[in-house]
Image: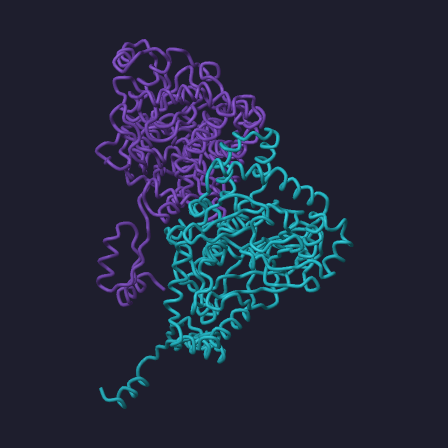
Chain colours: A cyan, B purple
Amino acid sequence: MSEPKAVLELFNSELKAVNMGLESFAETLLKEQVPTVQVDWRPPAGGDPDLINALDRIEKTTKVDVEAANAEAVDRILKGKPVVVGIGKALDVVPGMRENLILHAGPPVTWDRMCGPMRGAVIGGLIYEGLAAGRKEAEDLAASGKIDFEPCHHHAAVGPMAGIMTSRMPVWIVENQTYGNKAYATLNEGLGKVLRYGAFSDEVLDRLRWMEDVLAPILNKAITLHGPIDMRGIIAQILQMGDEGHNRNRAGTSIVIRELAPHLVMLDDSREQIAEVLSFLNSNDHFFLNLTMPASKSVVDAAAGIEGSTVITAMARNGTDFGIRISGLADQWFTRPAGIVDGLYLPGFTAEDAAPDIGDSVITETAGIGGFAMAAAPAIVKFVGGSPADAIAFTEKMYEITLSESDFYKIPVLDFRGTPTGIDLMKVVDKAIYPVINTGIAHKEPGVGMVGAGLVKPPENCFADALKAFAEHYG
Amino acid sequence: MSEPKAVLELFNSELKAVNMGLESFAETLLKEQVPTVQVDWRPPAGGDPDLINALDRIEKTTKVDVEAANAEAVDRILKGKPVVVGIGKALDVVPGMRENLILHAGPPVTWDRMCGPMRGAVIGGLIYEGLAAGRKEAEDLAASGKIDFEPCHHHAAVGPMAGIMTSRMPVWIVENQTYGNKAYATLNEGLGKVLRYGAFSDEVLDRLRWMEDVLAPILNKAITLHGPIDMRGIIAQILQMGDEGHNRNRAGTSIVIRELAPHLVMLDDSREQIAEVLSFLNSNDHFFLNLTMPASKSVVDAAAGIEGSTVITAMARNGTDFGIRISGLADQWFTRPAGIVDGLYLPGFTAEDAAPDIGDSVITETAGIGGFAMAAAPAIVKFVGGSPADAIAFTEKMYEITLSESDFYKIPVLDFRGTPTGIDLMKVVDKAIYPVINTGIAHKEPGVGMVGAGLVKPPENCFADALKAFAEHYG
């Protein structure tokens, strides 16, 4: 058929349209009864010419083999085997820890820029350390310059919410057996009025002292009797038991209890204290969070610093800024103001009371569980909002921005598909799909505590900034 | 439009067909390019005239108000509140228990008709009781007429698999707090070579003696300290933790451990024995099954014997027969030969080795959990076969044969819909949809043990027989 004839035929034949992009064109055609197929297409990087250019430069770079670098990074994440080896005092075990240093969640932040709950937790931490007698003294000391503030992430550690770690606090020691690196986190205090949500009343400090004096030594002895706790094996199980390892941890906490209980009974400590420990664990379903966090950190850290890799190796918030780190850009942070969480509030509180997004717990999503595994934990929507269908859809969406799927962490309802693993900065920016994060919500004022839980979208520009820097560095 | 004209128009217009029933008609039309809609319709009761007649008689009966009777029966099931009040010796607590009586699973069965695994468990039970020294002596005694055999169900009890209960065995005591009735079951021994699967080696008997001497008294003391265990609350939780309460019980067992552990520690028994108890519980994920079973029995028993109700109040198998009981037909059993389970086999075994369907554990399905709640436990398919989509489809199908939905037991993935509750014999026969049952598989020979797990369809005629009897009685 010659071309003019074909064109002629086109005008004589019934019109059938395929529309890409803006749906309004398709809607207009459909109104005119023209059969129209809508194709879900969006321009790369939301059509931003700078970002398209950056993506282009990275794809065409000959400086490094980005694909090979990413394959290496993801392989390291997939092969990570975190085990709990014990509990130690932060000063003794956390690299670079010292008495005048306070570690906090998120990217670096100075006292004057800290949000309310982080200030509250710093106040509590200074009183707990015996460095201040009360709020005023603690605030003055914090502002004096005599106390150093550094991110947990700079010390192979992670902290939920405010993430405050002081030198005498007991910390979990998790080792990535495949690569030999370690990660650390404090022990979970429970929900409500707790240090990590910015509360620092006597009740909070008394609990921290009991955790140091009773809980930590007893648990540590039980772990010695039990042997290292295989976190990879337990996380694989809990994803079949309605947990996702970030904000639903009832199964994980249960498994830790049943694994340790036979050994706890055998300790020489008073049975009253052992019973206190078991009651505390039974009353605190979030206990396991402070184990999935360092487990995730130890796994993702093994993939950090790979020349040419666009894999995201840290996402973290301090209640002021949200920040990310990229494997191929060493220890550089890309930060933007932290967002507000969309969630469910405890009785008496509203979004008005909320501090911006805070905490290192998004390390779980970075490692491919938490929000990325929500399809395994549909009941979580009673805690963070939304419907079970949303929970499944969130996980499905995350496959679009990840490079692989876990060989160990399987989601039954998705036909035992592995969790989406290895977030690729290029995919995130290209598709303008951002990591799904579920999180607790702290009151914006120091001293109050938890007010709710929900979902939060990270600031898009964080990822755009990182991509441009990566293109600059390698392009 | 006058009728002849309408008919004429029909012949002149394009043919569009709606086909009900047999799909082959629709397929023929579709082949001829005739637009055809297939309606999923089947004649009531599979088109069986006797059953259609029986359904008709029941619907038209004025002797009793079947609808009101069923509403009452379901209301009682929905309001049941089972709590574990303790552990006792069968002889002391099970109504009608005596030293020469052996209770078994399923409808009544005599020694000569018993299947292999039930014979094996009887042999083990007689040796355990000190009534026989070995297999031969036990078989002779069992055949002598000196031992009475009666169903667990006739003594407010239920037993998994062979379901053998002898007089000195420790049993769970579960009370339905709403109606005051009690139910009983032995304690779970674990998987593999165990009495309930027909094994009776020294290893099996030693374990039973340890359960009597150590496990039961220690657990009973811990329950006394803890207070009654709210089974309704725990079952509600485990359905959000990937259990369905019949063949997946990892969450349930975990919750029992974490609830009791703080009290176990406080007992005066030796810490070695308490540690043994905790290790045993931790190594046996089916431990909770022997709690969901009497819990279900206590709930469904409260709905038994309601004049005019077609609600099914018992389903049970003894490895020879499958039997059901209907609320409005008092204690009558309707039995047919037990089927063969379609399932996954342990290494070294095949369907050739399987005993027919056996056990009272289908009381869980009768009460609306187990197979009826499989959508809550997609990971169970790794144990019983099939896909997660099947598990969800099974639960959805069960809404078609039940009268209501649980107010307490919610399935997250079905948008927190209550589990299908109150099986209506009329719906089962009318729709020819049969209860979904998941189950363990025992070796057909005495003394071997477990060989697999799977799904089983109950014999259809059981339900047909019961319906005809009901129509006869009330019609």
Percent x, y of residue A329? 49, 69
Kindly tell me whether residue B303 is visible in this rendering: no
Side (left or right) of B348 relative to B301: left
Q: Is residue B21 left or right of residue A17?
A: left
Residue in the image at 62% along x and 37% along y = A214
Q: Nearer the viewer, residue B474 or B463?
A: B463
- Name the spot of residue B360 as percent of width and height, x first: 38, 28
Image quarter of residue A269: top right
Residue drawn at x 29%, y 39% as measured from the top left? B343
| Picture quadrant of residue B468 | top left
Return the residue nearer the eye: B50 or A472. A472
Determine which quarter of the picture holds residue A421. Answer: bottom left
| Quadrant of the frame with the C terminus of chain A | bottom left
Vertical arrangement, residue B62 with respect to residue A159, above or below: above
Question: Would you place residue B146 above or below residue B338 in this image?
Answer: above
Q: Residue B235, can we see it?
A: yes
